Image (tube, helix red, strand yellow):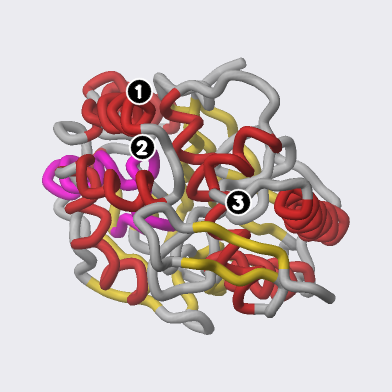
Amino acid sequence: MSAVRELAAGLWRIRLPLHFELNHVNVHVLRIDSGFLLVDCGYGTDESFEALESGLRETGVAWSDIREILITHCHPDHAGNAERVRERTGAPVVMHETENAYLPHFRRLVAEPGLLDPWLLSWGAPPEAVDRIRDSFADMTGTYRPAEAGRVLRGGDTLHGWAVIATPGHAPGHVCLHDAARGLLISGDHVLEAISPNIAWLAHRDALADYLASLERVALLSADRVYPSHGDPFGGLQARCRALAGHHDLRCNNILNALAAGGETAQQIVERLWRRMLSPFQHRFALFEVMAHLAYLENSGRTTCDRSAEVHRWIRTPA
C-alpha cells in the first residue's frame, strides 16, 4: 500500500515509519484557503522526515505551501520532527493550550530518561528492569525536536472549518478535528480501531478519568469516517468508543481481582495481567498504564495505597 492515500476531497494521509513494535504513524494534510494544514510531523529521525518530504511531494504539496502545523499531542511519534518542519516551512505550530503547557515536562522526560527511575522503583519494578527501561528510551533523546506553539487552541475553537475537540487522556492536551458537515473525524491517538491507546499515569491528573470523559464526548459526534494516527480509516465511531470504555472497565476489574489474589505493587499486577515477557519498552508502558488505572480506582474509592515505604503497596477497598 502506498504511503500516501487520498481520504476525502482535500484530505490526504501520509504514513511515516516508526522503528517500534507499532511500526508507523499517520500524518494528515488538509487543503485550506491559503494553502495546506499539516496535522502532526512524525518521529524525529531522518528516515521519518524524508518519508514526510516524499509523501508531500507525491501529494503535490511543497514545504512553502504549508501554512500551519497542528500537533494533536506532543508524544515523540507525533511531534518529534515539529521543529525541523517548522524551520523548513516557516509555518507556525498550533496545539492545545494544555499540551503546550506540558511541553517542557515532556522535553525533560525525554532528555533525562533517568528521571523516571524513582517512580518505577516505587511501583515495585526491579532495579535491573529499571536500568533496561531507561536504556530502551535513551535513543529518543536526540530525536525529540518538538516546537512550542505559536498559537494555542482550546476545545470549542475551529481551525480552518474543522471543530477542535479537546480529548485529554492519552495526553493531557490531545485534540481531534471534526468536520460535522462531511462526517469526518481526525482522531489522532484518541480512538484507534485495532488497539487501545496507552493511558499513562501522570502526576496531578487522573488520566483515565480524563480519557473516559473524552470518549463520552467524542461518541456524541456525527462521524461516518474516522482517520486515526495508527491503522486505517474506519467507521462505527460510537461502537468503537463503547468498546474502548469497556476495555478499561475490564482492565479495572482485572486489577481489582489481582489485588484480591495477593498482588500489591504495580509490578506484581503487571506480572499477573501480562503473562508473557515484555520488552523493556513495553514494560514501561504497562507499568504506567496500570498506575493510571490504580489512580482512577483510588480516586473512586475502590483502592487505597500505602506510600509509607519505598515501594508503594495497594489494597482493594472492601465493598
Q: Position of residue 253 (x, y in %)?
A: 80, 56
| Sequence-earlier tag: 1 or 3 | 1
Q: Is residue 175 left or right of residue 84?
A: right
> Is residue 70 one of those drawn in magenta?
yes
Q: Is residue 44 left or right of residue 84?
A: right
Q: Residues within 10 Å of mark 3 (few under 14, many from 20)?
A: many
> Is residue 51 one of those drawn in magenta?
no
Q: Nearer the viewer, mark 3 or mark 2?
A: 3
Name the residue: 62% across, 15% down: 1
Identify which amino acid the numbered label 1 is placed on: Ala
Secondary structure of residue under mark 2: loop
The quarter of the picture where the C terminus appears is: bottom right
Secondary structure of residue under mark 3: loop
Secondary structure of residue under mark 1: helix
The residue indicated by pointer 2 is 42
Q: Quadrant of residue 5?
A: top right
Q: Which residues are magenta?
A: 68-89
Q: Is residue 104 above or below residue 200?
A: below
Q: Nearer the viewer, residue 123 or 82?
A: 123
Q: Is residue 179 left or right of residue 202?
A: right
Disc number for residue 51: 1
The residue indicated by pointer 3 is 264
